[in-house]
Amino acid sequence: MKKTMKGCVVDKCIRLTSVFTIFEAIYQEDYYFGGETHDFWEFVCVLDGVLGVTAGEDVFLLERGQAVLHKPMEFHRLWAERKTRPHIAVISFAADVMPDMKERRFALKEEELDTLSKLMQARDDIFEVEQGLLIHKIKAGAEIEAHRYVAQFEMLLLKALQENTSTVLPYVSSGAENYRKIVQVLEEHLEERLTLGKVAELCQMSEAAVKKTFSRYAGIGLMTYFNQIKIRRAIRLLEEGKSVSQTAQMLGFADQNYFSTVFKRVTGSAPTKYLK
């Protein structure tokens, strides 16, 4: 009697689909990046020095060997700390499979830092690079090396996320605490049409203090940030099967057309792109 063998399906925990940037940079002591939001993942690792980071509502410091993984549509900004010249490695990418992570800050072991260094060095042998950081395409004949490159980075992420022994330092100050409080209030009222005055009232702060705090840690206007996190939630709702009209209504937009305008301004795409 012939036996039928059933194989064991092994699903991937991480699967990259494209790479946007790969680069190293050494910044001056007064380095200050105003911040950005984009619809792909970004891995930032400190190779030397100390880096200040805002990621969503969190404000923290990264030292040598420590890294952060910014999720899609998460606002983030960077700056030099403690009179150091931060040396960082950055890889940004899209993925159709990623683990559900509560903590996206972690410490790399020396072996993993060595792997990251080799990935940085191998970049120009495998990819055509524009402006010193943008990955344009795979070089002719380097397709297998490109797959190995991506697989090595996926393994590096898996190891770092699995071991996760980071002791990332929180940025301790009254201003940072106020910033966390403001962002938390915004997150809790995504379905509403908040004003600066209402946010100040909910945070028990003056309007001037709210504006000053947000300028210090986010570098963009309060309402601009509020729209960005609304759109981040909108993407999830659309992917869960909600219509554009339902999503606009659930997030407190006056009408669907205005929602679509804001959505395209934030993401560069129409909301219909994310419909399931």
Image (tube, grey):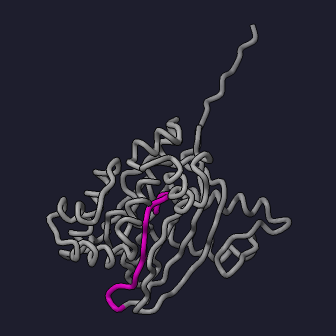
Residue depicted at 32% across the width and 71% down the height: 60
Q: Position of residue 93 (x, y in %)?
A: 59, 61
Task: Count the marks.
Answer: 0
The residue under the point 71% across, 14% down is: 3
Q: Is residue 77 magenta?
A: yes
Residue 181: tell me if it is visible: no
Residue depicted at x 44% and y 46%: 100
The residue segment tinted magenta is: 70-83
Quarter assignment of residue 182: bottom left
Which residue corresponds to the image point at 47% horizontal and 47% vertical from the top-left?
Answer: 255
In this picture, is 233 found above or below 58? above
| Residue most extreme to the right | 141
Q: Position of residue 212 (x, y in %)?
A: 27, 78
Q: In screen coordinates, is 197 left or right of 97?
A: left
Q: Is residue 195 visible?
A: yes
Q: Nearer the viewer, residue 231 or 101?
A: 231
Outermost residue to the top? 1
- Magenta region includes residue 38: no
* Pick the front one: 32 or 243: 243
Q: Could you say which quadrant of the image residue 58 lies in?
A: bottom left
Quadrant (top left/top right/bottom left/bottom right) for the N terminus: top right
Residue 222 horizontal/vertical position (percent): 34, 68
Q: Residue furthest left?
A: 204
For the C terminus, give its image quadrant.
top right
State left or right for residue 13 relative to residue 2: left
Image coords of residue 160 (percent x, y): 45, 59
